[in-house]
Image: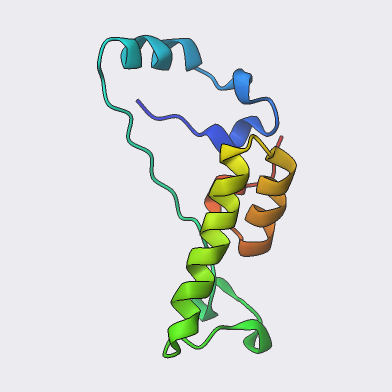
Amino acid sequence: MKRFPFLVGHDVAGLPGLEELRALVASGVAVVATGDLVHHGVGYDTPIDLQLDQKKETTMATARTWIKEGLDALCRHGLDAFFQNAAAVRSDLGAAPL
């Protein structure tokens, strides 16, 4: 089963197949989620002056901070903060809400 929750925007309850997913979870099925949480660098057309140096220790810490900020916003049900973070770091999870 594939679901793309970022496509529902702020209408989280509008996820197609949500009742089916709830039934599967109730039956003991594990839910596995993946995401491309940060798009950064030359491969993603990040402007040169904004590109982080992948050789610096701080680069990985910065990426982790960006990801944590987005996921923390989701945990708080802060969808506006989540979408702002997702737009800033160009996360797949925060594709433009419909």
- Left or right: where 14 falls relative to 5: right
- Residue 28 image position (x, y, % from top left): 25, 16
- Residue 11 image offset from top left, x and y in percent: 68, 25
Please state the horizontal and vertical placement of residue 61, each as a whole percent of the image: 48, 74
The residue under the point 59% across, 40% down is: 74
- The part of the image, by quadrant, that contains residue 79 is top right
Q: Residue at x 53, y 73 (%)?
A: 62
Q: Is residue 44 above or below residue 14?
A: below
Q: Quadrant of the N terminus?
A: top left
In the image, what residue occupies the spot 52% across and 56% down?
Answer: 68
Q: Is residue 50 left or right of residue 36?
A: right
Colour mapping: rainbow
Q: Is residue 72 above or below residue 48?
A: above
Q: Is residue 21 above or below residue 46?
A: above
Q: Quadrant of residue 27?
A: top left
Residue in front for this viewpoint, 14 or 55: 55
Q: How many marks?
A: 0
The residue under the point 49% across, 56% down is: 37
11 vs 85: above or below? above
- Which quadrant holds the C terminus? top right
Residue 60 at x, y percent in the picture: 44, 75
